[in-house]
Amino acid sequence: MSHTNAPVQVHHVVTGRTDGHVVVLSNSLGATHRMWDANLPALEEQFRVVRYDTRGHGDSPVPPGPYSIDDLADDVVALLDQLGVERAHFVGLSLGGMTGMRLAARNPERVEGLVVLCTGAHLTPASGWHDRAATVRADGTKAVAEAVVARWFTPGFLEANPDVKASSEATVAGTPAEGYAGCCEVIAAMDLREDLPSITAPTLAIAGADDPATPPPDLEAIASAVQHGRLLVVPDSAHLANAQQPGIVTAAIIKHLRGSAS
Ligand SMILES: O=C(O)CC1=CCC(=O)O1
């Protein structure tokens, strides 16, 4: 997990309370800061909410890949520095959760409470991520959009919500190919298993019961390896548990972070 690139200034949006604890929200591969829309109103009542687009995604810069997990964590440190925030809660889903685990292990002084959703400490095989990076570099992100969104939501949810299916596929297809590929290469090279025991921030690991990408045992492994971990398995939910079950997930995030404030 070498550190190869300089931090970039990521695109971000700050909303919510001006006097509250800060919570940073970090997106999944192929998504943007908009993936938190359904969770936002309740979070904004409690916290100063900082949403950002991971490098290579949304309106953030797209340096040439590959990137490393340290690059993604360094981008968050640079963002906190830019905002003058010493210490924040961090909530990340999938790639965002990986960023949060690396940040919490390497910069424990910057992370108050941690919530990781639908993620893993080591996603194998690496060849699958290299293959996906090659596909999007050759054919664009549209080539993977339908298959990706089929993992984001359960089949029944997609059937009942064709608008969500269409807008989610458009988001993936709108992700710059080089940014998406560079982040696939983050996951290919990443192994956070040795980082977990050094994570001191109270950690809530949230799994989607029907997530085919990072199933509940991946989250259980995180919850049991960090110093203060808890697991929540959300029923009737695939990879984007925050979007498929916003009520359950937002309430769990708020309860955990309110209990983690120091
Ligand atoms: O796109 C997928 O297969 C699911 C996923 C893995 C890491 C991430 O951020 O999304």
Image: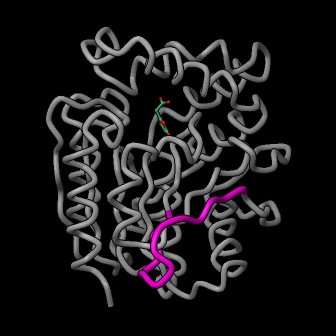
Q: Say above or below: 204 vs 175.
A: below
Question: Is residue 227 part of the magenta span, yes or no?
Answer: no
Q: Say above or below: 184 vs 228.
A: above
- Give the x, y percent position of residue 112: 39, 81
- Give the x, y percent position of residue 140: 74, 18
The quarter of the picture where residue 208 lies is top left
Question: Is residue 23 part of the magenta span, yes or no?
Answer: yes
Query: Could you tell whether 169 is left or right of 131 in the image?
Result: left
- Give the x, y percent position of residue 12: 66, 59
The structure residue drawn at horizontal position 68% and vertical position 81%, both measured from the top left corner, is 81
Task: From the viewer's side, name the closer residue of 223 and 28.
Answer: 28
The structure residue drawn at horizontal position 18% and vertical position 64%, both measured from the top left corner, is 230
Q: Say above or below: 34 vs 24.
A: above
The quarter of the picture where residue 187 lies is top right
Task: Tell me the quarter of the image containing the N terminus.
Answer: bottom right
Which range of residues does the magenta coloring cover? 11-24
The structure residue drawn at horizontal position 25% and vertical position 76%, both measured from the top left corner, is 258
Query: Could you tell whether 204 is left or right of 150 in the image?
Result: left
The quarter of the picture where residue 256 lies is bottom left
Q: Say above or below: 166 vs 228.
A: above
Q: How many marks?
A: 0
Query: Could you tell whether 82 is left or right of 46 in the image?
Result: right
- Give the x, y percent position of residue 45: 35, 67
Query: Could you tell whether 198 is left or right of 176 in the image?
Result: left
Task: From the viewer's side, name the closer residue of 102 and 143.
Answer: 143
The structure residue drawn at horizontal position 68% and vertical position 21%, both measured from the top left corner, is 141
Task: Tell me the quarter of the image containing the C terminus.
Answer: bottom left
Task: From the viewer's side, name the closer residue of 53 and 191.
Answer: 53
Q: How is the image coloured?
A: one colour
